[in-house]
Structure formats: C-alpha cells, structure tokens
Amino acid sequence: MNDFKGNFMGRLICIDAGHGGTDPGVCGNGLKEKDITLKTALKIGKLLSEYGFDVVYTRTKDIYVTLSERCRVTNSRKCDAFVSIHDNSAANTTANGIEILCYIKNNLAYYIQQNLIDELNLTDRGVKERKDLYVLNSTDM
C-alpha cells in the first residue's frame, strides 16, 4: 500500500459498512453480514487514516442507514471516493474470492483489487461495472 497515494489523487474517502441495524444482510454459520462489514469498514478506515487520508463513515455502529442517506453523507462531504463493503453469499459452497463493483472501471478499483488479492491470497473475481446499483449511480464521485 506504500504507493497507494501515488495512484489516487483524492484525500477524503467515504467508507460504507453495508447493511446494519434491522437489515442483517446475508446470514449463515452464526454470522451476520452487517457485523462483518462494520468490523471491516472500521479497520479499513483506521488503516487509511494511518496513511494520511481523511475518512468519513456512513455508520460506525449497528444502526440502519438508508441507501439515500449513505449517498447524502458522501455527497454532502464532497468525498473523493466511496467504498461500500459487502460480503456476498452463493449457492455454490466452493465459491470464494474478491470482486470490486464500480460505476465505471478505473485505476483505483484495479489497484485495490490487486492488493486485496495479493494480501489475502483469494480468487480474483474481477472488477465489474454496475451502473444499476443505487449507491454507485447516486454518488457524485
């Protein structure tokens, strides 16, 4: 991650812990997606702060935040990047890996994807455009 700042010109990053409160997300094996995404978001935010970035969170505790509120938070703060954390499930129990969904494929998405793959040694599921996702098509950055 040492050359991350050289690959991204922005300074303010919004970290969105998916789901929360009354919306648990995917549940299985005694785990709830909302809990995993919150822990992950807080760890990522702390790491980014240590690298000199300013971080805004859509939630820092187990509360429900609407999709429109998530977008309002990031747009009103004029964030340079929006990162929404999710854990997906699959009917195929051998499915695994990391994928990045973005409004438009970009260097930052590929950079994050490659570093996650290298660091976690998981399957590369690719960087994919998803213009149909509300939080991607309703944020300004």
Image: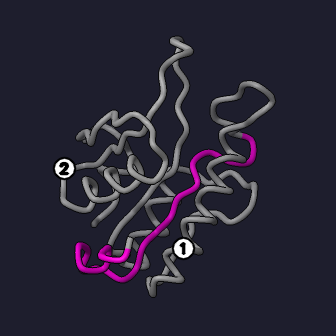
The part of the image, by quadrant, that contains residue 45 is bottom right
For the N terminus, give its image quadrant. bottom left
* Residue appearing at x 25%, y 41% in the figure: 131
Q: Is 10 included in the stretch rendered in magenta?
A: yes
Type of amino acid under label 2: Lys
Tell me the residue that label 1 is attached to. 47
Q: Is 88 included in the stretch rendered in magenta?
A: no
The part of the image, by quadrant, that contains residue 115 is bottom left
How crowded is the residue under tag 1: few (<14 C-alpha within 10 Å), some, or many (20+)?
Answer: some
Q: CA distance from mark 2 to mark 1?
A: 24 Å
Type of amino acid under label 1: Leu
**Sequence order check: which comes first, mark 2 or mark 1?**
1
For the C terminus, give its image quadrant. bottom left
Horizontal placement of 138 versus 53: left or right?
A: left
Tell me the residue that label 2 is attached to. 105
Q: The magenta stretch spans which residues?
A: 2-22
In the image, residue 68 above or below residue 129? below
* Residue appearing at x 25%, y 39% in the figure: 128
The part of the image, by quadrant, that contains residue 43 is bottom right
Q: Position of residue 74 (x, y in %)?
A: 43, 69
* Residue appearing at x 23%, y 73% in the figure: 7
Q: What sort of colour scheme is used for the picture? A: one colour
Q: Position of residue 41 (x, y in %)?
A: 58, 60
Q: How many marks?
A: 2
Horizontal placement of 116 versus 110: left or right?
A: right
Q: Position of residue 3 (x, y in %)?
A: 29, 76
Q: Residue furthest right?
A: 30
Horizontal placement of 67 versus 100: left or right?
A: right
Depth check: 26 or 69 in front? 26
Q: Position of residue 122 (x, y in %)?
A: 45, 38
